[in-house]
């Protein structure tokens, strides 16, 4: 055992040396037309050797370290407590959520414009993650092309505004419905697929949409994207300094206050907040309806679900459609927030991040997904000080998270549905 | 009065024919057992009745209605229930939720009534009402699988190897319950490897061999049949 550890540790240390020496220890310098290879400072070499030693020591005593890590939850004062009674828990949760929403309503008036802008992005990710949570967390269908529906929502608004001058409020339902329809269309060919195969097909679908947007230059502008997407209005009041569209008034003139760029940002934030809350409530409702239970049954055991008379087609399509619908919602808000969209915003990495949010949050758990969306969006921003190590820190945080809490931040605690005794 | 009739049913898995023209008849209120060796096509026959896969030729008639080409979901909502091989309960759901899933297409009051009835048949399930189904013993899971099937008010229930992997004492209980179901007027179609107990309980029995019905008689006669004794009852 010990010898085995030692050999493994030695191997790891050598790999560390092999990887870090060329990356950190050597550098190319251009002197005129010639490129010369030069070494780094002595301190860098010392650091590389120290890192290799650290890896060696860690790998040798790995079991001890990991064992100690495993005991960590014992420091958590809440770990040993009895689980709360369901009715009590539900009540506490809803109070907590109401508190958070009320706080979120007033929060933008207290902080900087940049924070509010970031918070709007967080809310968009919350909508996306809640939607994907239906497909992946509840129905158990691994969808790697979820960003396609987000793109459909965003491009619906962008194109309609470009060609017909539609407003945000009109585009919102249209974008969501079109995205839902796309979800349904994708649902049909993948009805028979499960697991890995489904993941590959949805991945392909996501890429198809992106490449289509990228290459259909005459309609979508290709890689140049679409700009000038209008901002939302409040009952015909615009938030710009000057009124762009005839018949509209401007917000600051109507209320007789000085113009401020912050109004627009805060208004967008509030719209995103309201939509995110609506998304959460609607999906919560679905989870408690028969269709929610059907999703879970299909995830648990497809053959058993079918033997009870559940239609595989209807259950899978409903999950895909509802998930895609909310992605379309988020896409419309995103287009309006950015004012400009291009296919670059809808790459596979986006799908991966949304999926990571769902997994980190604890599959199927709404509160967990919301917390994870906040963490995943804000963490890279907080780590900005570390500049190039930003994504490294982000990656390390994800790995650690999965080691400590493989079940997610707040694993789903299923709500039990009981019938009234008398009937 | 026949409950379920199979007329010259052929079933294919791709190009391979698994059932070569099977005809079976189950009358109302009967227990009919289907016995056969591994790979004889017992499970295929049951799955064909449920429409997955669908029969490639022949006719399947359930309570006078031709269901040969109906989709599974529709067949399973029309008075037929199956306890699948290997139980296939929803292990992440509680016992009660499993039962509610069984009554997915019935009204709330029906669910309440049927649930009480299932708890009467299997008091053990009542004790475990709020436990996750996957944490129960094999016998309890089998009871739950039968209970779940009963939640849809079936006229006929199909059981695929209900004794699989269970202790003899539990098997005895399960077979007692199956007998009790007949007394309640539910038609039972039982597929078993455990031929002795299955034929003992059954009114009639069929012997399936390599996709064909070889023998068909009353349960009692089959038990005494020397061929059956040699092949399925250990001499």
Image (cartoon, helix red, strand yellow):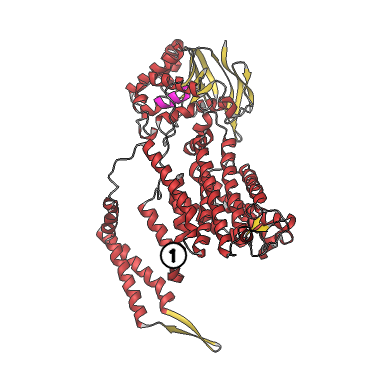
**Residue count near mark 1 (Cα–Cα under 10 Å), binned few <14, some 14–19, many ≥20:** few
Instruction: Check if residue B148 falls in the magenta segment.
Output: yes
Q: Is residue A286 left or right of residue A230?
A: left
Could you say where residue A51 lies in the image, as x and y percent from the top left?
33, 71
Please tell me whether the stretch drawn in magenta is mainly helix, strand or loop: helix
Q: Toward the viewer: A395 or A330?
A: A330
Residue A395 visible in this rendered orientation of the protein = yes
Residue range (magenta): B143-150
- Seen at 60% across and 62% down, the residue is A344
Chain that bears disc 1: A
Q: Can you say which quadrant of the picture contains the N terminus of chain A?
A: bottom left
Residue A196 visible in this rendered orientation of the protein = no
Q: Is residue A285 left or right of residue B54?
A: left
Q: Toward the viewer: A67 or A192?
A: A67
Could you say where residue B104 lies in the image, as x and y percent from the top left?
51, 28
Q: Toward the viewer: B99 or B168?
A: B99
Q: State the SS at label 1.
A: helix
Instruction: Check if residue A237 falls in the magenta segment.
Output: no
Could you say where residue B161 lies in the image, as x and y percent from the top left?
44, 25
Position above or below: B224 against A323 = above
Residue beneath disc 1: A382
Q: In this view, does B134 lie to the left or right of A337?
A: left
């Amino acid at each position: 055992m010990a010898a085995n550890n030692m050999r493994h540790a030695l191997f790891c240390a050598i790999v560390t040396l092999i990887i870090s020496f060329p990356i950190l220890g050597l550098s190319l310098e251009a002197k005129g037309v010639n490129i010369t290879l030069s070494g780094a400072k002595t301190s860098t070499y010392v650091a590389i050797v120290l890192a290799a030693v650290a890896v060696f020591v860690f790998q040798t005593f790995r079991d001890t370290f990991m064992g100690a890590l495993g005991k960590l939850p014992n420091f958590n004062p809440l770990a040993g407590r009895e689980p709360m009674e369901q009715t009590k828990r539900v009540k506490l949760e809803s109070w907590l959520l109401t508190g958070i929403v009320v706080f979120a309503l007033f929060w933008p008036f207290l902080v900087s414009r940049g924070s509010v802008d970031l918070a709007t992005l967080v809310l968009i990710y919350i909508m996306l993650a809640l939607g994907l949570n239906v497909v992946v967390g509840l129905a158990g269908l691994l969808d790697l092309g979820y960003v396609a529906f987000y793109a459909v929502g965003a491009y619906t608004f962008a194109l309609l505004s470009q060609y017909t001058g539609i407003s945000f409020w009109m585009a919102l339902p249209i974008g969501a419905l079109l995205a839902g329809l796309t979800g349904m269309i994708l649902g049909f060919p993948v009805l028979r697929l499960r697991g890995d195969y489904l993941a590959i097909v949805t991945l392909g679908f996501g890429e198809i949409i992106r490449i289509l947007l990228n290459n259909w230059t005459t309609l979508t502008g290709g890689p140049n994207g679409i700009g000038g997407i209008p901002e939302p209005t409040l009952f015909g009041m615009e938030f710009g300094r000057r009124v762009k569209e005839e018949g509209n008034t401007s917000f600051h003139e109507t209320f007789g206050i000085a113009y401020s760029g912050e109004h627009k940002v805060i208004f967008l934030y509030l719209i995103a907040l309201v939509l995110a809350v609506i998304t959460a409530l609607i999906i919560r409702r679905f989870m408690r309806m028969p269709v929610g239970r059907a999703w879970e049954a299909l995830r648990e055991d497809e053959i058993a679900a079918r033997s009870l008379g559940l239609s595989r087609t209807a259950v899978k399509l409903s999950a895909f459609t509802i998930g895609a619908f909310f992605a379309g919602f988020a896409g419309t808000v995103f287009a309006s927030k950015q004012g400009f969209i291009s296919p670059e915003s809808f790459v596979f990495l986006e799908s991966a991040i949304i999926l990571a949010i769902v997994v980190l949050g604890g599959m199927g758990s709404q509160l967990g997904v919301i917390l994870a969306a906040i963490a995943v969006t804000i963490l890279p921003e907080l780590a900005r000080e570390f500049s190039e190590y930003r994504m490294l820190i982000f990656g390390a945080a994800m790995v650690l998270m999965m080691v400590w809490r493989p079940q997610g931040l707040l694993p789903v605690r299923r709500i039990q549905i009981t019938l009234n005794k008398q009937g | 009065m026949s409950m379920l009739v199979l007329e010259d049913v052929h079933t294919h898995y791709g190009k391979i024919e698994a059932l070569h023209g099977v005809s079976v008849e189950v009358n109302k209120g009967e227990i009919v057992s289907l016995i056969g060796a591994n790979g004889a096509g017992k499970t295929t026959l049951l799955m064909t009745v449920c429409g997955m896969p669908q029969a490639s030729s022949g006719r399947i008639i359930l309570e006078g209605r031709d269901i040969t080409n109906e989709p599974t979901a529709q067949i399973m909502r029309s008075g037929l229930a199956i306890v699948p091989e290997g139980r296939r309960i929803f292990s992440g759901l509680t016992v009660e939720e499993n039962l509610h899933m069984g009554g997915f297409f019935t009204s709330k009051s029906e669910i309440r009534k049927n649930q009480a009835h299932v708890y009467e048949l299997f008091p053990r399930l009542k004790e475990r009402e709020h436990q996750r189904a996957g944490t129960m013993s094999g016998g309890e899971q089998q009871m739950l699988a039968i209970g779940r099937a009963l939640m849809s008010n079936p006229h006929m229930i199909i059981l695929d190897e209900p004794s699989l992997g269970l202790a003899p004492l539990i098997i005895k209980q399960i077979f007692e319950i199956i007998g009790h179901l007949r007394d309640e007027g539910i038609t039972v179609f039982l597929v078993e490897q455990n031929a002795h107990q299955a034929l003992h309980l059954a009114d009639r029995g069929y012997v399936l061999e390599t996709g064909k019905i070889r023998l068909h008689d009353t349960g009692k006669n089959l038990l005494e049949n020397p061929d059956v004794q040699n092949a399925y009852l250990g001499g």
